[in-house]
Image (cartoon, grey):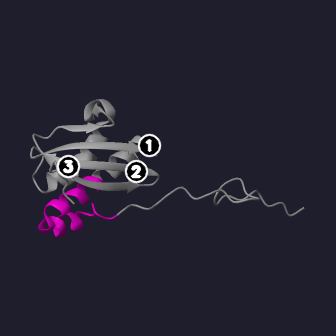
Amino acid sequence: MPTADTRTYATGKRKTAIARVWLSAGTGTVIINGLPVDKYFERETSRMVLRQSLELIEAQDQFDILATCTGGGKAAQAEAVRHGISRALIALDPEKRSVIKRAGFLTRDARKKERKKYGQPGARKRFQYSKR
């Protein structure tokens, strides 16, 4: 939903990471938590994941992205930002939905760490059985 200053907002999630993303017409600048993308995401793979949905619709240099991330690790945050960017792109242009959906960028990856159970050392692992 566009706001008064023509920014489009969307929320992206992955594991326990949450990204709030604002998309506006611009030159391709990406700012995450007040830092340029190169400073915030040191790994090239995280930066590549972040730009996947923009590259898919060939709009790398058409939008400025402002995002705030909380929770999770850097890799999950990158995927959360990608999810948010994809949702914002759909809000701007609903015709791109089928292309982005087919690539799997609109599906929220809900896999989280399974909780540890009582009487066990971990979520699935059991203590060694002793017959005698």
How far apart are labels 2 and 1 at the CA level?
A: 10 Å
As drawn, the label of residue 18 is 2
Magenta-drawn stretch contains 81: no
**Residue hosting label 1:** 73
- The magenta region covers 83-107
Give the residue at x 33% y 36%: 33
**Residue hosting label 3:** 23
Amino acid type at mark 3: Leu
Amino acid type at mark 2: Ile
Q: Does the rendering let one see residue 19? A: yes
Q: Which of marks 2 and 3 precedes in the sequence? A: 2
Kindly give the residue lying farthest to the top in the view shown.
Answer: 39
Q: Foreground residue, 121 or 106?
A: 106
How far apart are labels 3 and 1 at the CA level?
A: 23 Å
How far apart are labels 3 and 2 at the CA level?
A: 16 Å
Amino acid type at mark 1: Gly
